[in-house]
Image: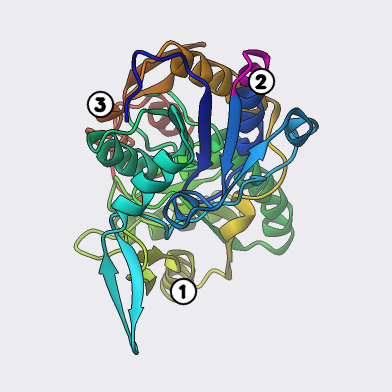
Amino acid sequence: MSKNNEKLKRIGILTGGGDCPGLNAVIRGVAKPAHDQGLTVLGIQDGFEGLVEGKARQLYNTDVSGILTIGGTILGSSNKGDPFHWPTEFGNEIKIVDKSEDAIRHYEGWNLDALIAIGGDGTMHISKKLMDMGMNIVGVPKTIDNDLYATDQTFGHDSAVYVVTEALDRLHTTASSHHRVMVLEAMGRYAGWLALHGGLAGGADIILLPEFPFEWENIYDKVIERNMMGKRFSLVCVAEGAKPKDGEMVVKAKDIRRTDPIQLGGIAELVAKKISDNTGLETRYTILGHLQRGGSPTPFDRILSTKFGTYAIEMAIKKKFGRMAALKGSDISSVTIESAISKQKLVTKKCQAVQAAVAVGIGFGVDL
């Protein structure tokens, strides 16, 4: 399967996991240089679902022209398409089966020499397993959560931070007008980068993160103190995975069809109710949800995605398989996919953004 002694002729590209701004920019960054090198580019539809089910189409230069600024992905995506965790209906019951052999069969049937897999932690874990079965894969790190290890930043994160920041800017004016506490819930799952960076940029007074389980009294004291100082409103930016000390994350739903069945959501409502009940301050909450995934990528993400894409096809042509493009400082280099998934990148107390937040008086619901 490896064809390591042959010149690269046909590559596949897929976008796995949740969508985010910048995916099309990466597709463009891969396909245009590939076409210039005379390669055939096959776009696999709906992430790994397309690899299992045999859904793909050839991408021509016209397909990737004019897509730099467009959000989402022209190939479609899915976070339920894990070949090793494939939901199948048996009567009224859903069972999980292994469809990885189908993925291999289509890879070989399409006569691919390599696959460019664009995605986050889940995509890279799947890629590692498929590599062990013989596939030639190059990874590109994508996730608004920014929790993929071995790269300074993933594309999509900056665009999502912009959405959180703008939402806080808008909540700021209505909070100050009505003298309310406004609680904004950001995505991020088990990592707090999105809430941290969005909260810092949007002037949040309190930021609650999964990495720092919070104390209720600490939050109450903060908003009451602000109120007594004449600051008659407060902004709270809470990550969906945040939880109180000795408490649990708020789980919205569970879906066994996903590799990680837990769907988080609802912590903002809980925080708002507790603040209102225990301080007497009028409180409202907003859950941004999938607004953070949509829309056009920021200039930073357009540039980063293009650099990732062009570097990825360069790695593929040089047969540097099993590696992922990674941002180190201002330059793109590569790391092994294995190292990228060795652990999750989480916020720490020593993080400079955390230290800057503390220095300007932002609370984290716990003494840091």
Q: What element carries label 3?
A: helix
In depth, the one of 197 and 338 nearer the eye is: 338
Mark 1 neighbour class, 10 Å CA radius: few under 14, some 14 to 19, many 20 or more: some
User: How far separated are the C-alphas under marks 1 and 2?
Assistant: 56 Å
Numbered tag placed on residue 339 in the rendering: 3
Q: Is mark 2 on a helix, strand or loop?
A: helix
What is the three-letter code of the residue carrying label 2? His
Labels 1, 2: front one: 2
Q: Is residue 179 above or below residue 2?
A: below
- Do we see residue 328 in this rendering? no
Q: Does the magenta stretch include residue 178?
A: no
Q: What stretch is highlighted in magenta?
A: 32-39
Q: Do the residues labelled 1 and 2 touch (CB within 8 Å)?
A: no
In depth, the one of 278 and 209 nearer the eye is: 209
Q: In this view, does 243 lie above or below 193?
A: below
Q: Position of residue 74 (x, y in %)?
A: 67, 45
Q: Is mark 1 on a helix, strand or loop?
A: helix
Label located before the other in sequence (2 or 3): 2
Query: Which residue position holds label 2?
Result: 35
